[in-house]
């Protein structure tokens, strides 16, 4: 019996691209008004590109986006000959905008219904905050990659959540949009995966098939209930540890 449902956040419960684009604009405007040497010669898009390059050059921190972004802001301050003490305030400006999201239309109702029968867990490689966003009432637990020490598809995030809940992997199903992070990550942890494929993309052939596929969350309850018309794959084999370092 499925007792635990894990949910990815970005691009599963809301579209992340417009959120990040707006957050970058808000941060850029804030920096431009207070630290213009940082934004000189840049647009919000070009400064974001610099940020991505900075992050890619530090793969050892890729699981902790908050630490990475604060480090990037301090880096910008040093380059522009500003004191670094603005970084915390600048990050707070970005983070507030980053957590101003518009969930997909069906999300609130589906989560509310599922939470009456299952334990819901948020599992994210990002740094979204379900408390700030207003969805925390539906979830028993939230774990992100910074807390787990690794991002999906590493199984540690799943194992940490299951350990805290006192549940085995076979009691859980995970719902997410990313074939590698979510479907492969769940498979690595011995957890069933449901692929949230809103764009109708083909599933990559090199990744084990998900237990189920949905195009929006309204299809999740009947899939879980095993109603007619829904074809599900077998549960994955138990995970055997592999060194991913």
Image: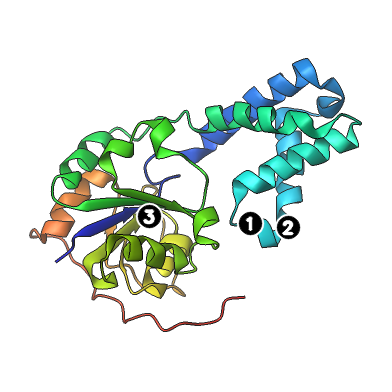
Q: Residue at x 81, y 41 (%)?
A: 75
Instruction: Tell which circle, 3 or 2, labels the residue nearer the N-terminal end.
Output: 2
Label 2, label 1: how many angstroms apart (C-alpha)?
7 Å
Front residue (pair 81, 231): 81
Judge whether residue 136 can be spotted in this image: yes
Task: Point out residue 54 in the picture as x, y percentages from the top left corner.
Answer: 76, 49
User: Mark 1 and mark 2 in contact (Cβ < 8 Å)?
Assistant: yes
Image coords of residue 46 (percent x, y): 76, 35
* Above or below for 220 versus 90: below
Q: Quadrant of the N terminus?
A: bottom left
Disc 2 residue crowd, few under 14, some 14–19, many 20+, Cα 10 Å? few
User: Within 10 Å of the Cα at label 1, are there few (<14), some (14-19), or many (20+) other Cα atoms?
Assistant: many
Find residue 116 and report its image quarter: top left
Q: Which mark is residue 62?
A: 1
Instruction: Please name the residue that numbered disc 3 is placed on.
Output: 176
Q: Secondary structure at mark 3?
A: strand
Of callouts 3 and 1, which one flags the residue occurring earlier in the amino acid sequence?
1
Side (left or right) of 2 relative to 130: left
- Return the x and y of residue 153 as percentages of the image width and height: 48, 66
Disc 3 to disc 1, C-alpha distance: 19 Å
Q: Secondary structure at mark 1?
A: loop
Q: Please, what secondary structure does the residue beneath circle 2 have?
A: loop
Q: Residue at x 81, y 29 (%)?
A: 42
Q: Is the C-beta separation of discs 3 and 2 under 8 Å?
A: no
Extreme-left residue of the structure: 228
Q: Which residue is mark 2?
A: 58
Q: Which mark is residue 143?
A: none
Up the image or down, 202 lies above or below 21; here it is below
User: Looking at the image, what colour scheme do you see?
Assistant: rainbow
- Which mark is nearer the camera, 3 or 1? 1
Residue at coordinates 42% horizontally, 61% vertically from top-left?
A: 182
Q: Residue at x 11, y 58 (%)?
A: 225
């Amino acid at each position: 019996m499925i007792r635990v449902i894990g949910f990815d956040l970005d691009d599963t419960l809301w579209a992340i691209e417009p959120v990040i684009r707006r957050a970058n604009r808000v941060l850029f405007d804030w920096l431009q008004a207070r630290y213009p040497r940082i934004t000189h010669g840049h647009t919000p898009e070009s400064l974001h590109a610099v940020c991505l390059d900075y992050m890619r050059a530090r793969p050892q921190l890729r699981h902790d986006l908050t630490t990475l972004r604060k480090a990037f802001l301090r880096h910008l301050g040093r380059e522009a000959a500003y004191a670094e003490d603005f970084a915390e305030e600048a990050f707070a400006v970005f983070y507030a905008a980053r957590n101003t999201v518009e969930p997909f239309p069906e999300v609130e109702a589906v989560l509310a219904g599922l939470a009456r029968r299952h334990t819901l867990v948020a599992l994210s490689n990002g740094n979204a905050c379900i408390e700030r966003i207003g969805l925390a009432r539906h979830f028993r637990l939230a774990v992100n990659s910074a807390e787990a020490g690794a991002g999906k598809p590493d199984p540690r995030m799943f194992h940490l959540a299951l350990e805290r809940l006192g549940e085995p992997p076979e009691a859980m199903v995970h719902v997410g949009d990313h074939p590698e992070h979510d479907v492969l990550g769940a498979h690595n942890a011995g957890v069933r995966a449901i692929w949230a494929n809103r764009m109708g993309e083909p599933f990559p052939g090199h990744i084990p098939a998900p237990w189920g596929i949905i195009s929006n969350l309204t299809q999740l309850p009947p899939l879980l209930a095993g109603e007619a018309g829904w074809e599900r794959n077998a549960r994955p084999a138990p995970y055997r540890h592999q060194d991913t370092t």
